[in-house]
Structure formats: C-alpha cells, structure tokens
Image: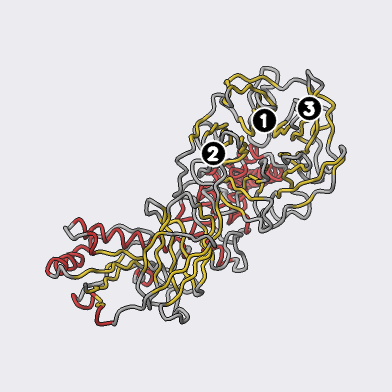
C-alpha cells in the first residue's frame, strides 16, 4: 500500500512538473511571438503542437508567425487547424487566412471564407467592393509584352528592394552571410541581417557582381530599402532602431525600424542622421522620393494608421521635414500597405496584402494627380500568388526590377527579378448603361459579365440599376460582355467604349412564352446535379443528357439555352463563374455527342435562382443545397 501511494505521489509530481513545463513553454512562446521573434516562437509553438497541446491560441499565433515570414503554405496549415477548432477569431486573422488561400491558389475556398467573414462581420467590406461596380480580376489576365526573369545578382539568401543610384548603378538589400557576421541571425526569420550592396548596370541590366556599399552605413543589424537623390549625394534608408551595437526597443520590447539619411563625400557614405519624424514607439521604413524630390514617401504603423502599416509622405524643404501626412483610406487599407515608388509622372506604385489580388503582397498603382485616387492592380507576370513588391522602372525604356518570393525553392527567400517591356497600363472606369427597348425601367436583376479575349470570366455583377461601372478597363485589350435578364433576350457583344467613356445597350423583350419551352418538362428529365464546388458532369446525369442528345438529333431546327445554377455557399462572384463552368461542361459533353456548338448557348445565373430558400443564414442539409446545384435546358425555336 505504501509503495502504491508513493507511486501515485511520484506520478502526481511528474504530471505537475510536465504541466508546469508546458505552461512555461507556452509563456516563453508568447513572449517570443509578442516581441516579433517569430523564428523562435515557431519552434516553441510547434513543440507544443507535437505534444498534443495545439489550442486555438497556439494555431492562430503559429499561423500569424508563418504569415509574417511569408511562408504561406505552412501558414495555411496552421490556419486550417485553427478554423477546425473555432471561427471566433479576429477580423485580421480572417483576412490573413483568405490571403494565404489565394496565395496557395485555393481561390474557391478563399471566396467561401470571405462569405463566412461577411456573415460574421456584416459591416465589413473590402475597399474594392463598391456598389454596382465590376472590378476586372487579375487572376486570368497576362501581359504578354513583359519579359520577366530572375536576376543573376541573387544569392542563396534574401535579396530584395532595388534602387537606382545614378544611371549606371543599383543598390539592393541582401542577407548574404559573411565570415564576420555569419553567427548573427535575425530573430524574425533566422536569416543573417541585411546590408546594402551595390552593382553596376550595363544597358540597364545587372552584371551579376556586387560589393558592399562603402562607408559607415552597414552595421551589425538590418539596413535596407535605400533611395537616392538625383545628384547621388544623399541617401535615405531603413535601419533597425539601434544604439551602438544593441537594439533599442519600444515599451513592449519590440525592435523597431527607422529611416536614416546618409551623405556621400565622393568616396564613402557617412554622416548618418536619424530623421526627426521617427519614434521609439512605432516603425518608419522603405523611403521613396517624388520626382521633384520635394516629398519623401514611406511606410509606417504610427498612431492614426488605418491598418498594419500605411503609406505616408513628408515634405522636404531646405533640409527640413514637415509633419507626416497619411495618404488616406482610398489608398491605405486595414492590411499592410508598403514599399512605395513614385514615377516621374507622379504614379505611386506600392504593395498591399489586403486588396483582392492574386495572394500575398501584390503590386498596385494610383495616379497621385487624379483627385479620385483610384487604385488599380497589375496582372501577371508582375503579380503572382506570393509576395511581389519593390517595383522600380525607367519610363524611357520599360526596363526595371521587382522583388518576389514566387519561386518557393529556398525557404521562402526573396529574389530580385529583372523585366523589360513594362509600362503603366492606361486603364479607366467606364459606365455601362442598360436600357429596355421601350425605354421603361428594367424589370428584375440584370447579370453583367465581362470576359477577356480568351473567354475567361474576369468580372461579374448582379445589378438592380441600369448603370454599371466597369473598373480597370485597359483599352489595349479585348473584352466582351454577356448581359442576362429574365425579361429580355440575352446579349453577347464586344466591349466598345465611345469617346465619352460610356456604352449604352438596349435589351429586347423576350419572345412570347410559347416560343420557349422547358426541355425538362417535355422529356420528363430528372434533375441534373453537381457536387459541391465542382463543374464536372456526374455519372448519374448521363442518362438524362442522352435524352437531350436524342431530341436535338430528332429536331435539328431547335437551339437550346443551357443554364447553370449554384447553391448560395461562397461569394456570389465565384458562384457566377462556377455556374458558367457547369453550363460549359454540359455544353461540351453534348458537343462530344455530335451536337453542333452553334445550337448550344451556355449561360450562368450563379446563386440568383434557387428552387428553395437555402441561404447561408439558414440551416440546410447538403441535400437541400444540392437541389440548387443544377442545369436547366430551354428550347428556343428557330
């Protein structure tokens, strides 16, 4: 008995010791996380997960740590585990999860998660979601004139943020390890700290040889993101908040970033000065100069920012600096807005992870001379599903550089890319006016879809108004429209804008009902259904589809409309695309059976025409939702 109780006591003490050890590990992990020591935090959190102690808090912090290191695949896995446990997470974590889903090309899942976000935060709308506006998606667009390649200046480590130094040199940031500093690692990502390097340009292309910037700029810790005045004698750059050989920290023990100024004496860079608007309580980083050098643009999370980091500018006059000016909520978002570059004609290029792009940090631009400050996105290959930032270029020849971690073969390290054939697209917003043939108000909702030259759907909207704005139209590209309204004949036509920037379309009323027949009722077809988020034709639909083939062969004088529908799960824009995919898949099956393609018209209504009232706000079974995932056939007599 004594041995038995001693055994229990030993076990109790062992368990207590383990629990204490686990609590201690979680405390240490949280301290590392809150001080932005993400590399160490990841090790500690993963240790707890491996011990079977993965809580919602641990998975959220682990996902955020990977996210801020731009390791989006591992961030996704952590967020997957988090959302399996709970959806009671912060708005910023929702957006980060959506972003990593897009980065890993899970666009359908990202749209579904965005729908869930709107249910949980109904007041929340992404800046791009403006009423009655179609935003053309960059997902399927490709600028073929741009030739982009990985630069020969890259090392096995992070190389990023190129700046021009005169006409024949560039300066960039790199975490290349040297013998002197190879034991000093960043607490953020466990790589060596970055220094500034310079390299020569030959015909605006890099030679592949680089050397450290001469002078007293490079220290033990991070120096990055330099920009130079036109005379090559003044440099602004980013550096850790550092006093001698030690970090300075804010009240939460976080190491911050500041912007410094250096002067060139003809041989070396020196006379380092901290700019007066820096603070020990917030970050200032990534400076850029306006073409006239009257303004310094930068990124900061100072009080008054809209998001994780905002874009600001300060005036420069007689070597003095004005007060920081936020660029406003039209440009800045609730996410990270960073790495500005200003062209000679006052176009601001920057990166953001909050707008609906391809994933990660994507590149955007805005004309600062335009009072509307409308923000537009770049298409592929400038943007990718990973981080893309730090774009600079010369307008004279269309050559330039950007940074990206799109090739995931080196622990998510950043690389420098060179490109040619680049120009800022001339894009605008255009108004589409839809009228009825008798000039009366349109009845019901009108579905407006925009397709690119390869018939890819790049924008859609269900509108109750007769004026729709199409945003981001590049008139050097080809587009066509599809307009569908229950009361009028469907229209397919090229997108042609007149000099006034408007396009007027008149819809013709539908023919009498006896000229259009529901093929399902005639043939007594069973419903043709689809799996969730799928567009392939199922085996159980083949018998019903063969009946359609038989009647089309028997009556060669008829044409049919193939109309796809979806359930209400997911974003309406995504469901619009999915319904068209289902209609096209059905059409191609019929074509494969010998039916002429010109007799088949594929249309999609998305979630707009359910046969029951299963919405996301209601409790419905999968069978209930499946009833709305269907195809309809309408016969139209010639």
Q: Measuring from the top left, give residue 271's x and y in whole percent.
A: 85, 26
Which residue is tagged 1?
164
Helix, strand or loop for disc 3: loop
Q: How crowded is mark 3: few (under 14 residues within 10 Å), some or many (20 or more)?
A: some
Q: Is residue 401 visible?
A: yes
First along the sequence among labels 1 and 2: 1
Q: How far apart are marks 1 and 2 (CA)?
A: 17 Å
Q: Which mark is residue 444?
A: none
Sequence-first tag of 2 and 3: 3
- Characterize the local packing of mark 1: few (<14), some (14-19) or many (20 or more) Cα atoms within 10 angstroms: many
User: Which residue is painted at 48% across and 65% down in the image?
Assistant: 503
- Residue denoted by label 3: 233
The location of residue 60, given as percent across then percent down, is 60, 51
Tell me the SS state at disc 2. Answer: loop
Do residues under tags 2 and 3 come within 8 Å of each other at their CB atoms?
Answer: no
Q: Mark 2 points at which residue?
A: 422
């Amino acid at each position: 008995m004594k041995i038995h109780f001693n055994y229990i006591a030993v076990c109790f003490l062992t368990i207590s010791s383990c629990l204490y050890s686990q609590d201690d590990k979680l405390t240490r992990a949280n301290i590392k996380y809150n001080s932005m020591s993400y590399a160490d935090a990841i090790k500690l959190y993963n240790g707890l997960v491996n011990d079977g102690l993965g809580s919602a808090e641990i998975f959220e912090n682990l996902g955020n740590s990977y996210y801020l290191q731009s390791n989006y695949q591992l961030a996704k896995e952590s967020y997957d585990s988090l959302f399996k446990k709970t959806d009671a997470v912060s708005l910023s974590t929702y957006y980060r999860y959506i972003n990593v889903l897009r980065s890993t090309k899970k666009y359908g899942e990202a749209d579904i998660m965005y729908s869930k976000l709107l249910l949980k935060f109904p007041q929340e709308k992404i800046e791009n979601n403006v009423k009655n506006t179609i935003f053309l998606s960059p997902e399927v667009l490709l600028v073929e004139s741009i030739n982009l390649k990985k630069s020969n200046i890259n090392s096995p480590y992070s190389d990023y943020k190129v700046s021009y130094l005169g006409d024949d040199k560039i300066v960039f940031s790199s975490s290349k390890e040297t013998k002197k500093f190879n034991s000093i690692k960043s607490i953020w990502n466990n790589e060596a700290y970055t220094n500034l390097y310079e390299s020569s340009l030959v015909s605006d292309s890099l030679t592949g040889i680089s050397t450290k910037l001469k002078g007293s700029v490079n220290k033990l810790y991070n120096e990055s993101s330099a920009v130079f005045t036109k005379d090559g004698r003044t440099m602004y750059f980013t550096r850790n908040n550092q006093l001698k050989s030690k970090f300075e920290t804010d009240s939460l023990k976080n190491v911050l970033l500041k912007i410094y100024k250096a002067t060139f004496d003809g041989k070396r860079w020196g006379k380092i000065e901290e700019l007066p608007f820096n603070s020990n309580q917030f970050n200032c980083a990534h400076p850029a100069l306006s073409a006239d050098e009257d303004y310094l643009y930068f990124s900061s999370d100072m009080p008054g920012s809209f998001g994780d980091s905002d874009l600001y500018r300060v005036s420069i006059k007689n070597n003095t600096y004005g007060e920081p000016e936020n660029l406003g909520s039209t440009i800045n978002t609730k996410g990270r807005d960073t790495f500005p570059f200003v062209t000679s004609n006052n176009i601001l290029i920057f990166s953001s992870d909050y707008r609906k792009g391809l994933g990660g940090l994507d590149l955007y631009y805005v004309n600062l001379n335009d009072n509307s400050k409308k923000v537009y996105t770049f298409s592929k290959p400038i943007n990718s599903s990973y981080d893309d930032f730090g774009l600079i270029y010369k307008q004279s020849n269309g050559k330039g550089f950007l940074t990206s971690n799109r090739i995931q073969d080196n622990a998510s390290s950043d690389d420098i890319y060179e490109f040619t054939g680049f120009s800022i697209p001339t894009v605008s917003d255009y108004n589409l006016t839809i009228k009825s043939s008798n000039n009366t108000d349109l009845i019901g909702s009108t579905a407006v879809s925009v397709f690119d030259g390869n018939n890819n759907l790049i924008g859609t909207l269900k509108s109750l108004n007769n004026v729709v704005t199409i945003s981001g139209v590049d008139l050097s590209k080809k587009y066509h429209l599809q307009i569908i309204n229950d009361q009028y004949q469907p229209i397919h036509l090229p997108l042609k804008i007149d000099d006034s920037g408007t396009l007027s379309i008149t819809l013709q009323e539908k023919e009498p009902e006896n000229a259009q027949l529901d093929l399902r009722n005639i043939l007594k077809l069973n419903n043709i259904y689809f799996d969730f988020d799928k567009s392939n034709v199922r085996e159980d639909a083949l018998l019903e589809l063969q009946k359609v083939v038989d009647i089309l062969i028997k009556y060669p004088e008829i044409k049919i409309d193939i109309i796809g529908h979806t359930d209400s799960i997911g974003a309406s824009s995504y469901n619009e695309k999915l319904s068209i995919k289902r209609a096209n898949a059905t059409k191609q099956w019929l074509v494969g059976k010998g039916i002429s393609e010109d007799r088949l018209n594929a249309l999609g209504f998305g979630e707009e025409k359910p046969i029951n009232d299963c919405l996301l706000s209601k409790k419905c079974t999968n069978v209930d939702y499946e009833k709305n995932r269907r195809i309809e056939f309408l016969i139209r007599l010639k």
